């Protein structure tokens, strides 16, 4: 037998280089994406992007003000639908349910999480858009809200689970009813994690396009209220990018830059707040 | 509890002086640690350890938890180098050559190790034992490998129990059998020294007895160092014993002396069960 | 009502068992009911999703039966719908994506888990998880404006000059194609493979590595012969997860695949995927059968991703539990 260290070291160094290269490529892609968006998006960005409505084809100076507001409204509704259901469901799983029911709910939540976003769009079309007879901001909010639920459930449950049992027992031993111990002791202890989880959840659906394609659809103009179709940032990026007009392409870059900046900022903030904790919910 | 000064405490190497109840002629020094200091970051875990291991004898290292005996034994095959932030100063001589300056893979071929909890690979029994051959460019065909595997399993007193299922998963074996498999795996590369770090701590008395028996049989070909927290085991199995406390070696002598007539108060307190 | 908290009796002040009314007054029942309602809502919503998919696709399912999956005609005008071109496009782009992403992703995962110093490993993992957060439409943007032109100008001509005789690289290349979609998809799924595989590798117990090193094996030999086999089930799981992700990807794919329902041997030809055709044609569907066929496509997609995700989760949990027990 021969320890053959020379060969072993050679292979070690080579594989270090090869696997390191894979990592550099993977990370490099991120910088590549950022670089192009900052460059192409940055140079197309102007105040009119944020303040103007889309202009007819051929006219310059159009903007995406309505899409920005539309995205805001859709995400607001999504949060109002998704977070309460997700949060309370997570509380139920962590604090109240028994093993069998918990298993079922978790299974169902994971199932919902795995549904492709376009399929969510189909279902919300059939249950909201079709009966209403038209596309609407409301439908868009429902679609994204449904997508927010599973991540919110998982994240809430994990962070509540991480709160030590001794805290609960201390509150109960002082005579607090169970619900009060949860609200005043357990949830506050898990709060940082839950908020971070919510932010990551929001960042994920903020970039979703497919479910909005046949719920909120799109709109060249402002969309007052909740009952009319609405422009949203991701859908505008899609529409403009595949169209044959250069000006629209420029605006697509600008919109992409804005969207990505928003999504990454929320992500980085949430992850850094979490990095002093443990669990990071994955897509 | 009386504290030792910074000078190394009494270490009698039984070549010539002291009582030798074994009646054997003075044996050769196979492995020698000289002035070892070991650091985890800023914390010093071993203080100036010097110690000889006699060829073809069993040396036991005993002491309370955290005394450094496991840390020490892991330096003997340079396993400490797998942990970042550790530092070892001193020398370790194997047949006169300092292993700390040699090629680490060659060292590990000569100094094998069996760990506290059995850790067979997720492979067949056969492949577990043959692993050391495969990663070290064994020159020989399939038949030669089969021979080595069988010989090692025989030496580890496992062959009879597994000869019909040698191509089945190692996880089908009991805890004691898995540990003997790990011994067979270590023996397959024919090490000159075998280090065992509390090999029986997770095993029942019957499995433990089987392993102690096979160590007796092995020592005629191999130098054995065994860390154990079980004093009865040390007394049963070993020819020499070293007592460790707080990272220092307090006393080293033949097993009979350590257990019946120890020189240091701390040793006496420990072996009589007054602490630890 | 079941309680998940056990409190020693001595911790509570002595009193008679609380009556229902007093529990109600303490808000206990209300709190329980509120959270239970939320959990039930989740259950109901998921059931509703399934129900709608099945119900709304029934027209098409009854008309075409299983043949739907094997027919390649997609003719909205005459009402003939077959899913084969979309299944083909979805499968081929996903496989291509895996072929690229698996070696790249596993290589990076090995580097991050086994070879890189912890601080570099954590920093790079952080960046790679950010990559996973990039929206699909952004990948599509880069696909359309950067990748496709680059493929057209440089990469595909280079490939064709070497491999042009192979059937998968035959024919004219106009940029949008199965090939382009496969590459964009591979970039999108790499972060998932890396992050899950890295965790799985990290969960392999130290003792396994130590046993290998103690026998004189090198670091790479240990990784390849011991760590990877230990982690193999979990890595399979990460691949299934990535595949499920790739199958359901809509925007980036639809922007670069060419949106042509056809089945061609060449990767350079345009194609179509299930998610892409639904995205493009859903709002154009003029009659019930058309819509029903598209919903049926959604049902197929749901079914496949459901199975893959389930398998993935089992595989990943198995590996991480094995590591924890040791």
Image (cartoon, rainbow, N blue to C red):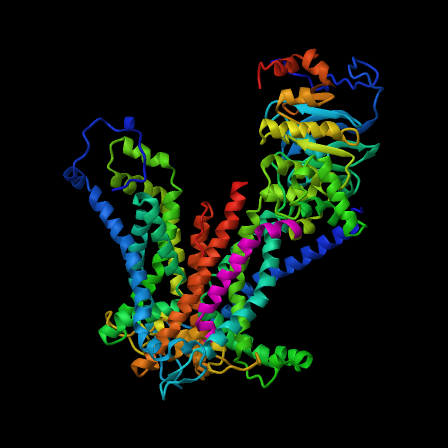
User: Which of these two is toward me, B186 or C112?
Assistant: B186
**Magenta stretch: includes residue C230:** yes
Residue at far bottom of view = C78
User: Which of these two is toward me, B261 or A275?
Assistant: B261
- Give the x, y percent position of residue C40: 27, 54
Residue at far left of view = C21
- Give the x, y percent position of residue B151: 75, 40
Q: Is residue B181 above or below residue B30?
A: below
Q: Is residue A252 left or right of residue C191?
A: left
Extent of the magenta region:
C225-254
Residue at 31% from the left image edge and 72% from the top image edge: A215
Q: Is residue B45 visible?
A: no
Residue at 63% from the left image edge and 79% from the top image edge: C154
- Give the x, y percent position of residue B196: 68, 32
Q: How many marks?
A: 0
Quadrant of res C161 = bottom right
């Amino acid at each position: 037998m021969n320890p053959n260290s020379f060969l072993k070291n050679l292979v070690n160094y080579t594989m270090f280089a090869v696997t390191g290269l894979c990592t550099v490529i993977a990370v490099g892609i991120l910088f590549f994406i950022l670089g192009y968006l900052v460059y192409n998006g940055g140079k197309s960005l102007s105040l009119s992007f944020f303040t103007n409505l889309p202009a007819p084809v051929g006219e310059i100076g159009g903007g995406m003000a309505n899409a920005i507001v539309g995205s805001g409204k859709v995400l607001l509704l999504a949060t109002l639908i998704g977070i309460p259901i997700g949060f309370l469901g997570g509380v139920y799983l962590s604090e109240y349910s028994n093993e069998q029911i918990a298993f079922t709910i978790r299974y169902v939540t994971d199932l919902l999480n795995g549904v492709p976003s376009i399929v969510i769009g189909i279902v919300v079309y059939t249950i909201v858009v079709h009966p209403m007879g038209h596309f609407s901001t409301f439908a868009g909010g429902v679609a994204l809200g449904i997508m927010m639920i599973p991540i919110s459930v998982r994240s809430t449950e994990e962070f509540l689970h991480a709160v030590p049992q001794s805290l609960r027992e201390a509150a109960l031993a002082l005579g607090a009813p169970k619900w009060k111990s949860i609200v005043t002791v357990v949830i506050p202890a898990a709060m940082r994690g839950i908020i971070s989880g919510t932010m990551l959840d929001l960042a994920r659906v903020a970039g979703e396009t497919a479910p909005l394609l046949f719920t909120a659809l799109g709109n060249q103009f402002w969309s007052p209220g909740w009952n009319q179709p609405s422009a949203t940032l991701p859908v505008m990026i899609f529409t403009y990018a595949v169209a044959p007009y250069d000006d629209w392409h420029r605006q697509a870059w600008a919109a992409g830059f804005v969207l990505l900046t928003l999504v990454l900022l929320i992500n980085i903030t949430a992850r850094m707040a979490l990095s002093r904790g443990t669990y990071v919910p994955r897509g | 509890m009386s504290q030792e000064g910074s000078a190394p405490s009494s270490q009698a190497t039984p070549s010539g002086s002291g009582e030798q109840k074994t009646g054997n002629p003075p044996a050769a020094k196979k492995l020698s640690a000289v002035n070892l200091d070991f650091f985890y970051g800023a914390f010093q875990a071993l203080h100036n350890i010097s110690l000889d291991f006699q060829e073809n004898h069993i040396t036991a290292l005993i002491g309370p938890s955290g005394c450094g005996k496991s840390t020490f034994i892991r330096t003997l095959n340079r396993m400490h180098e797998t942990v970042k932030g550790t530092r070892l100063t001193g020398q370790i001589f194997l047949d006169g050559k300092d292993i700390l300056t040699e090629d680490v893979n060659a060292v590990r071929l000569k100094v094998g190790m069996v760990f506290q909890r059995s850790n067979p690979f997720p492979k067949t029994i056969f492949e577990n034992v043959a692993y050391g051959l495969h990663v070290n460019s064994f020159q020989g065909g399939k038949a030669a490998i089969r021979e080595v595997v069988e010989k090692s399993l025989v030496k580890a007193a496992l062959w009879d129990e597994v000869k019909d299922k040698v191509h089945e998963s190692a996880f089908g074996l009991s805890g004691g059998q898995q540990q003997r498999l790990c011994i067979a795996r270590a023996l397959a590369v024919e090490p000159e020294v075998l280090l065992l770090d509390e090999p029986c701590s997770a095993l029942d008395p019957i499995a433990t007895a089987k392993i102690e028996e096979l160590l007796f049989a092995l020592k005629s070909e191999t130098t054995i160092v065994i860390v154990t927290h079980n004093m009865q085991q040390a007394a049963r199995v070993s020819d020499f014993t070293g007592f460790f406390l707080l990272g220092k070696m307090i006393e080293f002598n033949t097993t009979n002396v350590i257990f019946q007539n120890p020189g240091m108060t701390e040793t006496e307190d420990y072996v009589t069960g007054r602490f630890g | 009502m079941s309680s998940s908290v056990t409190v020693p009796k001595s911790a509570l002040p002595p009193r008679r068992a609380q009556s229902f009314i007093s529990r109600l007054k303490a808000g206990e029942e209300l709190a329980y009911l509120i959270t239970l309602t939320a959990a039930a809502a989740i259950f109901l919503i998921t059931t509703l999703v399934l129900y709608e998919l099945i119900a709304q696709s029934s027209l098409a399912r009854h008309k075409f039966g299983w043949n739907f999956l094997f027919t390649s005609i997609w003719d909205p005008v005459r009402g003939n719908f077959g899913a084969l071109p979309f299944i083909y496009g979805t499968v081929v782009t996903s496989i291509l994506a895996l072929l690229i992403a698996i070696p790249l992703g596993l290589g990076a995962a090995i580097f991050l888990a086994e070879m890189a110093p912890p601080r570099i490993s954590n920093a790079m993992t952080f960046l790679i998880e950010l990559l996973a957060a990039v929206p699909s439409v952004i990948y599509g943007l880069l696909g359309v404006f950067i990748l496709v032109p680059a493929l057209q100008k440089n990469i595909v001509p280079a490939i064709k000059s070497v491999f042009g005789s192979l059937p998968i690289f035959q024919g004219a290349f106009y940029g949008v194609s199965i090939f382009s979609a496969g590459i964009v998809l591979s970039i999108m799924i790499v972060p998932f493979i890396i992050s899950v595989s890295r965790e799985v590798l990290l969960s392999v117990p130290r003792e396994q590595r130590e046993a290998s090193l103690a026998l004189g094996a090198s670091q790479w030999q240990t990784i390849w012969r011991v760590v990877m086999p230990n982690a193999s089930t979990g890595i399979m799981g990460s691949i299934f997860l990535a595949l499920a992700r790739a199958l359901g990807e809509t925007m980036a794919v639809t922007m670069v695949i060419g949106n042509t329902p056809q089945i061609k041997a060449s990767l350079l030809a345009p194609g179509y995927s299930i998610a892409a055709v639904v995205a493009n044609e859903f709002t154009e569907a003029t009659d019930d059968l058309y819509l029903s066929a598209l919903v049926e496509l959604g049902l197929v997609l749901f079914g496949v991703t459901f199975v893959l995700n389930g398998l993935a989760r089992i595989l990943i949990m198995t590996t991480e539990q094995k590591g924890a027990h040791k």
